Image (cartoon, rainbow, N blue to C red):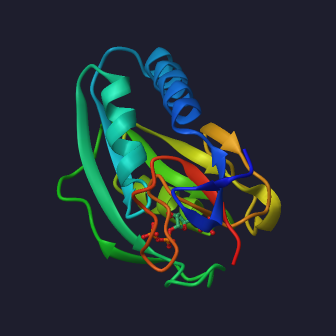
Amino acid sequence: MTEPAHGDTHIRMLISQERIAQRTEELAREVREGLGDGPITCIGVLKGSFIFMADFVRALGGPVRCEFLGVSSYHGGTRSTGVVRITEDLRHPIEGQHCLLIEDIVDTGLTLDYLTHFLAQRKPASIQTVALLDKPAHREVEICASHVGFTIPDEFVVGYGLDLGELYRNLPFIGVYSP
Ligand code: PRP
């Protein structure tokens, strides 16, 4: 679709609400098949993953723990600064648990790389990663999420948790922002 979405002429639809919902179900099935029926500790990376995580954990079903990590790396602009900073730590230990790190997007890969090493130090039974979006164009570390929803082109995306200057996170779809 190319027409303006939600009345904002700077945003065009890239991935619809329906496609996101369908892919989220598929990813959840994939993860459950891999990890079985036991407890999974889902760790959402704030803020961007909060909407995807809410839908994903419901699709996942079975025993699920929800944890969050506060991380900041973009600081309001449209390009990564490359600096990863933990702003809020996990509330509970994850030792011996099957963990799933949940990201809205992997761009340079610096955040995912940093966080997987960070979590590994807490001695979980396993760590997998799921990213709704993968934007490989600006990768700085060779890393890919274990489960990827959509691989997207080199465009600035907003909506479904992703922001521009803290706005647009509440759009129900993924859109491309062009000023
Ligand atoms: C975004 C996104 C990822 C990270 C990915 O977070 O949610 O956590 O950037 O980028 P990278 O692969 O280049 O490291 P951001 O810092 O924008 O914060 P937010 O989630 O609070 O919007």
* Left or right of 141, for residue 34: left
Q: Which residue is painted at 62% across and 45% down in the image?
A: 145
Depth order, front residue of 140/117: 140
Query: From where the camera sits, is residue 72 visible?
Result: yes
Query: Is 58 drawn above or below residue 7 in the view shown?
Result: above
Q: Where does the image place residue 56, in percent across and percent down from the top left?
A: 39, 34
Depth order, front residue of 118/108: 108
Depth order, front residue of 154/45: 154
Q: Where does the image place residue 98, in percent across and percent down from the top left?
A: 36, 34
Query: Is 16 drawn above or below residue 156 in the view shown?
Result: above
Q: Where does the image place residue 135, in percent across and percent down from the top left?
A: 72, 56
Q: Which residue is painted at 51% across and 53% down in the image?
A: 104
Query: From where the camera sits, is residue 109 visible?
Result: no
* Left or right of 49, for residue 3: right
Task: Name the quadrant of the C terminus.
Answer: bottom right
Query: Is 73 drawn above or below residue 107 in the view shown?
Result: below
Task: Name the quadrant of the N terminus.
Answer: top right
Q: Which residue is painted at 44% across and 47% down in the image?
A: 101
* Left or right of 179, for residue 24: left
Q: Which residue is painted at 58% across and 84% down in the image?
A: 77
- How many marks overall? 0
Depth order, front residue of 126/53: 53
Quarter where residue 47 is shown? bottom left
Q: Which residue is most to the left? A: 91
